[in-house]
Each structure stands twice: as C-alpha cells, then as structure tokens.
Amino acid sequence: MITPKERLMNVLKGKSVDRPPCICPGGMMNMIVEDVMDLTGSKWPEAHSDAGLMAELAAGIYDNGGFENFGVPFCMTVEAEAMGAPVYMGTKVNEPRVTEYPIKSVTEWKNLSNIDVNKGRAKVVIDAIKILKEKNSDVPLVANLTGPVSLASSLMEPMDYYKELRKKPCETHEFMEFVTENLIAFGKAQLEAGADVLTISDPSGTGEILGPKMFREFAVPYLNRIINDLKEYSETGTIIHICGRLKSIYKELNELESDAISFDSITNASQVVENVTNKVIMGNVSTLALEENTVESLKKISRNCLDNGVNILSPACGIGPRTSLKNIQSLVEAAKEYK
C-alpha cells in the first residue's frame, strides 16, 4: 500500500496516485490547533522553543487523523529573530511576531546577523526535524522557509522596504542576496536533518503588493535561487506559497522552479490550472471556512477544489489555532473519499 510520503512524492513528480494527498506544510502555513495541544499536552508558546514539544505537536496532528505530513516550525519569525529582530513568543492561541525592526533601511543590511543553525530557535527546528524523522519515516516531513521578500520586510518597516525597492534597487539587491544566502543555509540544515519536502511561503511577496515588474525582479530570482541551490537535498520536492490574487503574475509563476504552487482562497483554482501550466496545484480551502463551517460544508468545498484541478488538498493559508480538529479531519476524509 502506498505511504503518505510516497503519495506526496509521486504527485510532486507528476506521477499517478490512488488519491490526492492532504497536507499543511507548517511555517507560515501553520496547522497546530488547541485541540491537538490539549491531546498531546504540548502547548504554545513553550513548543516554539523546545524541540521535543515542537515534534510532539507536529506529530500530534497526523497521529490524530489530521494532515498527512509533519511540518515545523509553526510561525514565520525564526529567521528574523536569528538575524536580529526581537520576537514576542505569543500565547496558546497567538503566533509569535516581530516586535521591533533591527534595521531602518536596505543600506544597513551589514548590521544584521547571519543565521546560526547551531543555536536558538533555528537549532530547535532542526532538532525537532531529527526527532520527527525517527518517529515515522512513512510520513512526509516538511522543511519551511519564510520567503525572501517576507523575511526582508520582517527586518525593516515594510512600507519603507517597498519604497526602497524602487528608490534604492542596487542596495536592495545586495540586501536580498544576503537574506537569500541565509535562507539557503537554514533550508539546507533542515533538509540535511531529515526533512523531505521544502516549502517557501512568501506572503509579503505578492503580485498585488509588488506588481508584476517588481515581482519579476525582486521575488522570482531569489525564490529560484533557493529552490535550485536546495533541490539536491529535497528528496520529495519543492513548494512555493504566494498569497493574494495571482492574476497579474501568472507569467512569472510559470518561471518559478518549484514543483508545486500553493495559493490563497481568494484565487480560483481552475484559473490557476489554466494559466500556470508547469506546476502541481496545491490548495486552497479557505481558512475562515475551515474554522467556522460544518464538516459537511468543508467536504463540499474540498471536493470543489479537487474538481477544479487541485492536486494536493491543503488550507489556503495558516489555520487559526481555534479551528476544531474534526474540521481538519474532514479535509483528510474528503481527500480519501475522492475518486
């Protein structure tokens, strides 16, 4: 019988499978909910800084009939903190967030620290991956990176960053090179620790915010560099998640080197299938619906996604911690029932 890891690998490589996989990668696309915290006894915020608790939570989703993968961490602040940004660790129902920007301009990037994968929460993530690798090798283990634009705009005030893309393009490229090199180092450490899949989530690097020209200049080359530099370490495949409406950047999405594209519920899956022709399609169940709708409604939404051409069923973004486990289970059940 095909394992969850084999099923996801086959889909990402364009091979036939018995049914669609149902995953939620982690990182920005968090899948941890209160129900699983209570079942495992591992809770936020402690689990963000403890490898054992982090691994227990990630395994707890799969072990209790949830998503068919392991994925860590559960936020998008690990890299920013390692590079110098102070972070508030949140509560049981609120994710960590950056509280202060370490630089005020792209020209100050040399004041930032390099990510040290041997200390802090970067090491916690890597150690959690090692623990999870020992738990169940049949379950795909997802490494997560914050996308380069999103990380850059977590290190300085976002509006200033977006202005300097236009006003100081040469200095911005220097900054983006530095950010990208650090992301590659962190991604490599996660994959070498045992992760099978690489997901990069870049919610601030959208076509709506950047526009096609800036997306092509400041998002595509750096996303592709990460993918290409880490491809040899990613056994199963690579996924990129982009938020917002995708209509303005379909051409650019075709230029991305990832195996799969994941996207927001605001974008119609059938339009992505029609316009992005060289990618596995992942998504895009509304996280608001996932938190608020009934099981029956969520199964219908899931079937619609799959009917519209989605190859990997997944939430459209990170899910709210108050989402019920039974609602998560309904997505997995829909994938298992789909013919």
Image (spheres, rainbow, N blue to C red):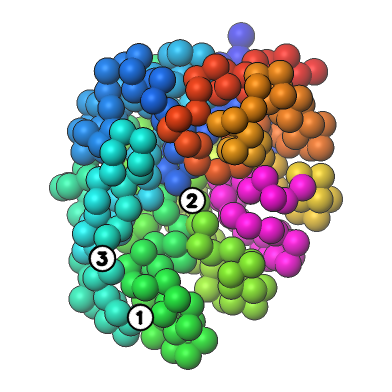
Quarter of the N terminus within the rendering: top right
For badge 1, the amino acid type reads Val
Residue 106 circle label: 1
For badge 2, the amino acid type reads Ile
Q: Which residues are magenta?
A: 239-268
Measured in 3D between alpha carbons, the distance from the residue under mark 2 to the one under mark 3, in whole angstroms, is 23 Å
First in residue order: circle 1 vs circle 2: 1
Along the horizontal axis of the image, is 5 left or right of 104? Answer: right
Judging by the rendered image, the residue that carries numbered circle 3 is: 100
For badge 3, the amino acid type reads Glu
In this view of the protein, which residue sits in the foreground, 322 or 60? Answer: 322
Residue 215, placed above or below residue 65: below
- Residue 211 lies, in percent from the top left, at 64, 74
Contact (CB < 8 A) between labels 3 and 1? no
Q: Secondary structure at mark 1?
A: helix
Contact (CB < 8 A) between labels 1 and 2? no
Judging by the rendered image, the residue that carries numbered circle 2 is: 200
Residue ID at (59%, 54%): 243
Measured in 3D between alpha carbons, the distance from the residue under mark 1 to the one under mark 2, in whole angstroms, is 22 Å
Residue ID at (50%, 57%): 202
**Residue 56 occupies quadrant:** top left
Q: Which of the two discs, 1 and 2, sits closer to the camera?
A: 1
Neighbour class for label 3 at 10 Å: few (<14), some, many (≥20)? some
Q: Secondary structure at mark 3?
A: loop
Q: Is residue 51 magenta?
A: no
